[in-house]
Amino acid sequence: MTNLSTSLNLPQPVEARRGTLHDEPALRRLWLIFRHDMSAYSRALPRPDGSYRSEWLELALTTPAWSAWLLTAGEHPIGFALTRAMDEPVRVFNSFFLVAPARRGGLGLAFARTVLAATPGPWAVAYQDANLPAARFWPAVAASFDDGWAERPPTTDHPRDVWVTFTVEPGGDS
């Protein structure tokens, strides 16, 4: 568990930790909000029962090559991160979300850095080019670890995804 400081007026402590099956209800609820937010870029509609596809969340809670992280403020779940390919040469930061009151105060950067620094090495993250906050955020995260970070524009296979690649050195969380 990592305490994160923030200038935001949130209940304390603000902590990041790996998620477990015990956290599934909170993660599932945050997932719904995340997928709703992302539907502005993906144009995905909810299923008939009001849910969104959630196989990535399920994999993050049950598969060793994935991991889930939960961000809390006091007793309140306020964000999550999912990573995958943890057993591959390049790890992938798959999904990232903070509730609106936890945004714009540096907490997202601190949370992303905590998750990334837990597993040093090469990383990649994709964001949708129409998602302007993500287009500012992920290059800043990459640059905070690696001056030689790179960005790959969308391709015909992934017409909306921009990929950012960078390396996190051991001890890169300081």
Image: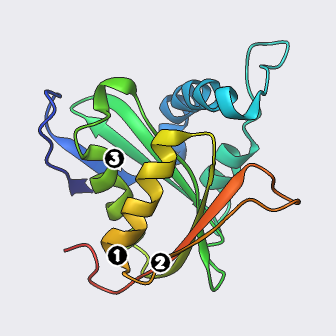
Q: Which mark is residue 145?
A: 1
- Circle 3 sits on which residue? 108
Residue type at the position of mark 2: Trp
Q: Earlier in the sequence, mark 1 or mark 3?
A: 3
Q: Rounded to the nearest whole Å, what is the CA distance between mark 1 and mark 3?
A: 15 Å
Residue 141 x %, y %:
38, 62
Mark 1 residue type: Phe
At x 68%, y 33%, the residue is 41
Identify the element where label 1 is drawn. Answer: helix
Amino acid found under the numbered disc labelled 3? Gly
Q: Is residue 40 above or below residue 119?
A: above
Counting other residues with Cα less than 10 Å from the Cα at mark 3, is it few (<14), some (14-19), or many (20 or more)? many
Tell me if label 1 and label 2 are in contact, CB under 8 Å.
yes
* Colour treatment of the image: rainbow
> Residue 2: x percent and y percent?
23, 57
Q: Is residue 19 visible?
A: no
Taking depth in this image into account, of 117 and 2 the one nearest to the observer is: 117
In the image, residue 166 sits, relative to residue 141, either above or below, namely: below
**Could you tell me which secondary element the residue under label 2 belongs to?**
loop
Residue under the point 65% across and 44% down: 57
Q: Between 20 and 104, which is closer to the camera in this rendering?
A: 104
CA gap, disc 2 and disc 3: 19 Å
What residue sits right under mark 2 in the picture? Answer: 149
Q: Given contact means CB atoms under 8 Å apart, are the residues at marks 2 and 3 in contact?
A: no
Residue located 81% across and 62% down the image: 155
Judged by depth in the image, the label closer to the viewer, 2 or 3, is 2
Quadrant location of residue 43?
top right
Does 37 sit above or below residue 65?
Answer: above
Q: Earlier in the sequence, mark 2 or mark 3?
A: 3
From where the camera sits, is residue 151 visible?
A: yes
Residue 91: which quarter of the image?
A: bottom right
